Amino acid sequence: MGETLLTLHDVADHFKVDTKTVRRLRIEDPDFPRPITIRGAERWTRADIEEWEKLQKLKARLEGQERTLGDSSGQSGTSAHPTVFPPSRRANPK
């Protein structure tokens, strides 16, 4: 099988978030990869996680373009389906 399998902690480390965030993403984001269960242990393929990450970046880029092309009042529209993205990828104001 040659695919790299990741534990819950590996996925959390990949995104630099807590394991609770990964669990929340599993529940709240229908696009978040479903784990494979092996002898009762959940594992994700690295390819699935990286594909989801690319999808989130593309969604964020497209939503930014929609806001730029939005209405003439200068107010950005809100999406009916907000992008769920790991907090570590958001800008952290200091």
Image: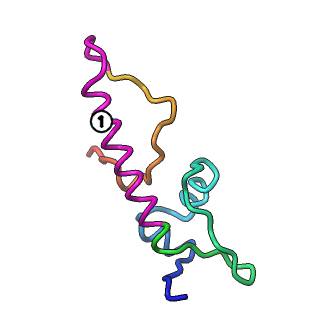
Q: Which residues are magenta?
A: 49-75
Q: Considering the numbered disc 1 on the image, is that residue within a helix, a strand or a loop?
A: helix
Residue 89: quadrant of the picture: bottom left
Q: Which residue is mark 1?
A: 64
Q: Position of residue 47 (x, y in %)?
A: 45, 72
**Toward the viewer: 49 or 13?**
49
Assign the magenta stretch its main secondary structure: helix
Residue at image coords 38%, 22%:
77
> Looking at numbered disc 1 in the image, what kind of residue is underneath it?
Gly
Residue 25 is covered by the magenta coloring: no
Residue 78: quadrant of the picture: top left
Residue at image coords 69%, 75%:
37
**Toward the viewer: 64 or 92?**
64
Q: Position of residue 52 (x, y in %)?
A: 46, 59
- Compared with residue 86, is residue 70 higher up or lower down, i.e. above or below? above
Q: Residues within 10 Å of mark 1 (few under 14, many from 20)?
A: few
Residue at image coords 60%, 47%:
28
